[in-house]
Structures are given as structure tokens and as C-alpha cells.
Amino acid sequence: MRALALLLTCAAPVAAQDLRLDLPIDCTLGETCYIQNYVDHDASETASDFQCGSLSYDTHKGTDFGLPSLAAMENGVNVLAAAAGTVRGVRNDMRDVLFTPDLQGEINGRDCGNGVVLTHGNGWETQYCHMKEGSIVVQNGEFVQAGDTLGQVGLSGRTQFPHVHISVRRDGAIVDPFAPDGQIACSGPPLETLWKLPIDTPAGGLLNIGFADTLPEYAAVKAGTASPPTLTRDEPIVLWAFAFGSRAGDTITISFDGPDGPLFQTDDVLDRQQALFMRAGGLNPPDNGWPAGTYSGVVIHTRDGVELDRQNTTITLP
């Protein structure tokens, strides 16, 4: 069993009962949101999450609850206070934009983007980052209850995808809510966490799938605009998948059936680790066009021979 050198800097073991957390986002994990990154527990220049997995990056100090598309962000998803506390800091005026190196000067140390800091007593505080410009509804000094709305998920600061980053600190030291005592081993998740309710923590999976009439641009997939509302019988049929947390050796299986039976399947073996990625496959129409009816697509993410995730979708050609 491999133990990791910890990046966390807690001066003493954390008593989990000192602070209990609700989800900091108004969504359903595994359906309308997901966890992209966890606290980095590896003190070297590489990274490891609390399960010795790859869902982190070097020196990452919080947990990222992500949305599957920019469209979901634009529709509005609330950021919630994870515990009762007092507002200690607010920033609400940074624009929502995908970070690029030329924006470094604009950010100028404000990597968190728009955000809120809450204090909870006994040295505890939580910080919420990358919130939507102008969405924050609390003020310095205000007391909030667990579950109260702080604002909305955004794309401000140093980020490449819409999410809320929550950092938990005690006496200024980072605490991983999934492993508050810092006792990390690779045999499985710790028994004690700071979360009030158990949280499923898949090590990768599918965010969204859909049909299109051409290979979609990655930007359209991330934006949530890759699938037109309808397809015609004389256009190609393409099934695309947007996913997270790949590892080398994973397989993405893309297949779809038509009214008369199976039409297409491809098994794509992935060659590297990626935080976010897309895959797609499809067919040109036959000479006389596709038959009218319902087309059913399925995408399966497999790791080490075990199904990690699957999603299904349908479209009807008139």
C-alpha cells in the first residue's frame, strides 16, 4: 500500500465533527454537475487526489464542482453556503471568460475570480471561487445559514470551465473535506469526511452526449451547443461524447441504432490522461437517405474492463 507525502499543512489532526458541510452548489451530482478536481495531496511537482487518483493538479487547494456546459452556467446554478457563517470577504466585478495567458495582467493575482469567504468559528473558513459576475447576493458582515444562496456558478478568474471551487481552511491551513485528518492511502476513501451526507466520487465519467450532423467543434461541445434540435434524413449522423478524468487505457465506446437495427460502433482506446475531452463517431447517409424513425445512441466509458459510466440519447428523423 503506497502512502503519499502530504501537501496539506494542518498543524494537528482535524476533528471532523468541528465542521460539517453541505454541498456548495444547487445541483444533482452525477446528473447536472460533477466533481472535476480535488485537493492535491502530493508534495512533489505531480498531483494526486485523496484516493491516489489523477483528479487534481499540482498545488490545487480545493474541490471543483463543475457544470457540463457553458449553457448550464448561463441558465443559472446557485452557489450555496456549505455551513452557517459570517461573510468575511466578497468580490463581484470580474467578467466571466475562459482564461488565456493574455489575461494574466487582468487577473493580476485574483485567480479566485468573483467569490465569497465565510468564517465559521474555531478557526474554520470556507472560500467560494469563480462565481458569475454580478451574481453575489451577500455582503461583508452578513450572517448566512447553511444552504443559503451566495451567488451563481461562473467563469471568472483563472479557470477553463464553469465551476465553483470551494476551499476549506482551519487556522489558515488547507483541509481536504474528503480527508480532513490528512491520512491518505490508496486502498480507498477515508471513512471520515467533513460532508454531512456521503458523496459519490467517481474517478472519471461522461458529462454529456448528443447527436449532430457533423463532427462538432470542441468549443461547441463545451458550450452545450453541439447538437441541433433536429436532423434530416440526407445528412450524416454523428454521436459525440464529452467526458472528464480519462486515463491511458480507458475505452470510450460510441454506438447507435436506427429503426432497422444496429448501425455504428467504435471503441476508442485512450492514450493519455486528460481532465476534459471529447470523442465522436458517425456515418454518412445512404444514397436514398436514412429511414424515418427513432435513432438511439449510447456511449460507455470503461476502465480496466469495468464500466465507469454510460449515457443514452435518442433523436427522431421525420
Image (spheres, helix red, strand yellow):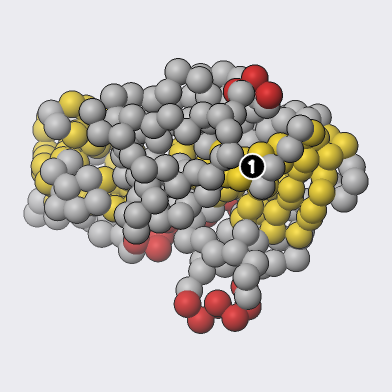
Residue projecting furthest to the front: 11
Q: Residue at x 52, y 37 (%)?
A: 176
User: Residue 3 occupies which quadrant of the picture?
Assistant: top left
Q: Residue at x 76, y 59 (%)?
A: 91
Left or right: where 63 falls relative to 301: right
In this rendering, is residue 272 above or below 97? above
Left or right: where 99 falls relative to 248: right
Residue 262 image offset from top left, x and y in percent: 11, 33
Amino acid on which the number 1 mark rests in the picture: Arg
Q: Residue at x 55, y 77 (%)?
A: 104
Residue 86 image offset from top left, x and y in percent: 84, 39
In this view, the residue in front, 46 or 274, is: 46
Q: Residue at x 25, y 59 (%)?
A: 215
Left or right: where 273 falls relative to 15: left
In this rendering, is residue 14 above or below 156? above
Look at the image and tell me whether residue 284 can be seen.
Answer: yes
Residue 47 image offset from top left, x and y in percent: 35, 50
Label tally: 1
In this view, the residue in front, 148 or 90, is: 90
Q: Quadrant of the C terminus?
A: top left
Look at the image and tell me whether residue 230 can be seen.
Answer: no
Badge 1 density bin: few <14, some 14–19, many ≥20, Cα 10 Å: many
Q: Quadrant of the N terminus?
A: top left
In this rendering, is residue 305 above or below 232? above
Residue 292 image offset from top left, x and y in percent: 24, 38
Q: Circle 1 is placed at which residue position?
A: 169
Name the element at disc 1.
strand
Residue projecting furthest to the right: 141
